[in-house]
Image (cartoon, rainbow, N blue to C red):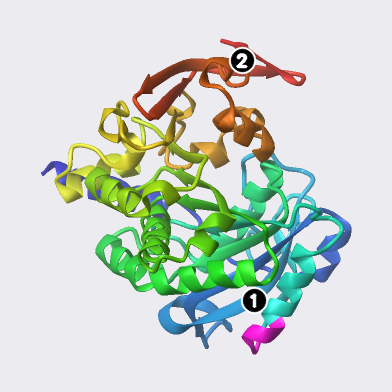
Amino acid sequence: MKNTALLLAVLLISACSQRGLLTLDPSAAAVGDVSTIFVGTTRAIDPAVGLYGAERSENVLYSRFDVSIPPDRDIGKITWPRHGKADPNRDFVTTRAVQYTSGGAFAMDLRRSIGSANNPQREAVIFVHGFNTTFSEGLYRLAQLSHDLEMPGTIIEYSWPSIANPLGYVHDRDSALFARDGLEQLIGEVKAAGADHIYVVAHSMGATLAMEALRQIAIRDNKDLLDTIDAVALISPDIDVDVFRSQAQALGPMLPNPFAIFGSERDFYLGLSSRLTGERERLGNLSDVTRLADLKVTYFDVSNYSEGSGHFNLGDSPTLIRLFDRVVDVDNALNGDQRNRVGLLPGVLLTVRNATQVVLAPVVIVGDEFRRR
């Protein structure tokens, strides 16, 4: 009965939520800040709309989208056009869309971006979206996240064939497994395009996919490729803890460092996932890091910033975004001496053998400083 009630709650939430649709308007480029997103996807083209849909493609398809981030918006929010009419002052709008007919053309543009003067460190961020996500939603989420968090370098999305249905959990889990080879291929292509530093960011069920791809790379003993992956961040990861441990142990000393996990005990959807899978906890809603003690990971408990479903706090919370508004600061925090980290991020720092847990305290931002509530 409890599971039935939770499923009904998911359906009610979804019914009240507008599903985002991509709107193309080149003139919006003159209004908002434009973010360029490269895309590798194992979604097949839906001929009805001429865009990537929910069907699976055995080949990786490539594209590029320029997305205008409107000036009139709250940080952490994505505003979709209503009634098919976009207002570039308040709505996210695609200003340019390119679907590559060959991997070679994609690789050429990707190489040009990675090697540009605007990317002196030759950095690339690869984002993997989560469960119940349309192509447009994943694309605009990455545009928002990369803009608000000021992600460095070239931004790339790996879009896997989620069916975008709240009752499609098992289908999406199978699709995530189906998409492992495609993500491994994309990571290799980003390196081949000249990236010296690759950061992998994955949300929800996409974290399972990302870890499976990294595990495959390790099993193939492709140390050269793993050495290029400088950091991994898992946001609300929907992974069985024991499965994650086996994935991380397969990587062994090749586990990227820093390795950050953002979780919340108040995550509604991970609570539902725990009940559906018969597990007490998922990786993204752990109460402590004791089960990860032998792994060199940092677990950020962002429960104090949970609003709504609490399933994407790092992207939704303006205060949390401000705390992590530069990836380089987070990187320094993770790599620095543990005893000296507390001043950068407000909260309680706990260490259990190799694992570190940071329980972030609620704060308010005043100017460029944070103060405890």
Marks 1 and 2: in contact by CB < 8 Å? Answer: no
Tell me what residue is drawn at x 59 percent, y 73 percent.
Answer: 189
Quadrant containing the N terminus is top left
Left or right: 272 as drawn, with respect to 211: left
- Residue furthest left as drawn: 1
Magenta-colored stretch includes residue 102 = yes
Which mark is nearer the camera, 2 or 1?
2
Residue highlighted by disc 1: 63
Q: Residue 53: image x %, image y %?
A: 48, 76
- Among numbered discs 2 and 1, the one appearing first in the sequence: 1
Specify the amino acid type for callout 2: Gly
Quadrant containing the C terminus is top right
Mark 1 burial class by Cα count in 10 Å: few <14, some 14-19, many 20+: many
Tell me what residue is drawn at x 53 percent, y 15 percent.
Answer: 339
Left or right: 248 as drawn, with respect to 150: left
Give the camera-side residue of 148 and 76.
148
Give the camera-side residue of 225 and 333.
225
The Cα atoms of the two marked residues, 2 and 1, are separated by 42 Å
Residue highlighted by disc 2: 343
Q: Residue 8: image x %, image y %?
A: 25, 49
Task: Establish if 290 lies above or below 113.
Answer: above
Which secondary structure lies at badge 1? strand
Tell me what residue is drawn at x 18 percent, y 50 percent.
Answer: 277
Span shown in magenta: 101-105
Q: Residue 207: image x %, image y %?
A: 41, 53
Which secondary structure lies at badge 2? loop
